[in-house]
Amino acid sequence: MNILSSPKFRFTVGCAALLFVSLASSHLYTQSTNKQLAQQNQSFTQQENSALVPSQISLTSNLQNPFVAQQISDEVIDKQKAFFSQQNLLAASAPFPVVDEFKKYKFSINGSQVVTPGKLPSSKVNFNQKDLLTVLVNTRKYFQDYSSQDPDILRTGMLATQGVTIPDVLNTLNFMIAVLKEDVANNRATRLQDPKFINSNFRVIKWTAYNPKNKKQKQLRITKYAVFTHSGSRKKTSTFNTPIYSLKENSNNDKFYTRYTKQDVLSGIYEPGGKEFGKVKSLAYLTRTGLEEALMQGTILINFTDGYRAFFNVDRNNGMSYVRGLKATAQKRYWYFREVDAIKGYGYKIDAKISIKPGVTFAGDVLNIGLGKVIVIEHTKGGRKHLQMGVMADTGGAFLPNLYQLDFLAGIFKSQKEFGQNISQLPEYAIAYFLVKK
């Protein structure tokens, strides 16, 4: 048998390549961090932002091969552990540079003060098995399909200070998917709901909130978002008089829409007689409340007067920043929508966004925490500890930067009252843990 065609030879080479990429990734992270800290009062350069891309794109392409992705030998993993055990002490003490949505440096944090080794308490971990599996699979597919187009997802985030790499994130997704598929196929409660199984098979990393405006905050603030159903019309009426629009394909070349605030749009510039009439497509007309809820939540389920029903998700905005503390009607940021087939989370463009499920999805700071992180939140209710698991598969303007808050996708609701009744059972603050496959 030709040695080059030997399965054992190919497996060994594949494992060695994966180890090399992991080590190179860690080395590049250290170099990148040193550069960033040396230039704290300057913007990140394009070269620094892309420093991790070549090696980690190579890794992602390897992980699309299930042979490499799911059959990493214990020997290789042991070598990785040995390497990172030496690097972790150095990495944990190194400041982590936090950036805003434009990847401009904002401040630095001490990793060891924000993320530290932990352990889940002995309470059942709650989640819907099939929904979690769906979000895990869709998130992994995003890494596989769009790493080259969206280098932001190759940022490990602050967990890099604990030696966590993109290979670790993908290995965690792979392992959880395999466990869930096996447990669902056997019609049994998944092992991922057992804290003993999690503590044995995962690094549990506690996340202590870092809020520059409230240094006393230690637990994560858990806000909630939802998809609301609203009635709407294809045409403008006295009741449904507030439009949502879609940008046309040529809008990528002519970014006229970046000149106009939400107030400009609602003044009628795209309506018949308006100075930009014909440049966008009218999707629906809602009440003003319907529009504001759609803008705030990112997705809306519209019941049209003609009987048609569909989800609409934010596509592109006008490039104006969301201002915290400013009331919704006064915000200048405006989003253009597209019709979609499911609730959508993170994605660099509308056609690439991750399809997500309520109850198992968190929105958070993707640039500084990282896409695809599996998170468990802990809170006490009625004297008992409750654990809830989800995947960070969404983001939003309120999270750039934000190391003290997560937004939990609660569900689909008909009204704010129904939404309020549901979230009254959920915590306002919680202890949070990241799970990383050992």
Image: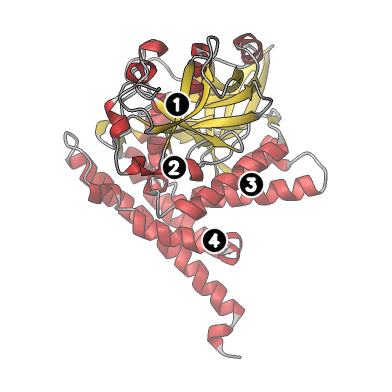
Local packing at callout 3 (Cα closer than 10 Å; few below 14, some 14-19, many 20+) is many
Q: Earlier in the sequence, mark 2 or mark 4?
A: 4
Residue under circle 3?
Answer: 176
Rounded to the nearest angstrom, the CA distance separating label 2 from label 4 is: 21 Å
Rounded to the nearest angstrom, the CA distance separating label 1 from label 2 is: 32 Å
Identified by mark 4, the residue type is Gln
The residue shown at (60%, 52%) is 174
> In the image, which is nearer the foreground, mark 2 or mark 4?
2
Tell me which corner region of the image, top left, top right, bottom left or bottom right, holds residue 320.
top left
Given contact means CB atoms under 8 Å apart, are the residues at marks 2 and 3 in contact?
no
- Dot label at residue 208: 1
Vertical comparison of 6 with 57: above or below: below
The residue shown at (44%, 49%) is 165
Whether residue 223 is visible, yes or no, is no
Q: Could you tell whether 184 is left or right of 283 in the image?
A: right
Residue under circle 2?
Answer: 349
> In the image, which is nearer the foreground, mark 2 or mark 3?
2
Identified by mark 2, the residue type is Lys
> In the image, which is nearer the foreground, mark 1 or mark 2?
2
Q: Position of residue 125 (x, y in %)?
A: 68, 31
Give the SS element for disc 4.
loop
- Dot label at residue 431: none
The residue shown at (32%, 55%) is 27
Q: Position of residue 322 (x, y in %)?
A: 35, 22
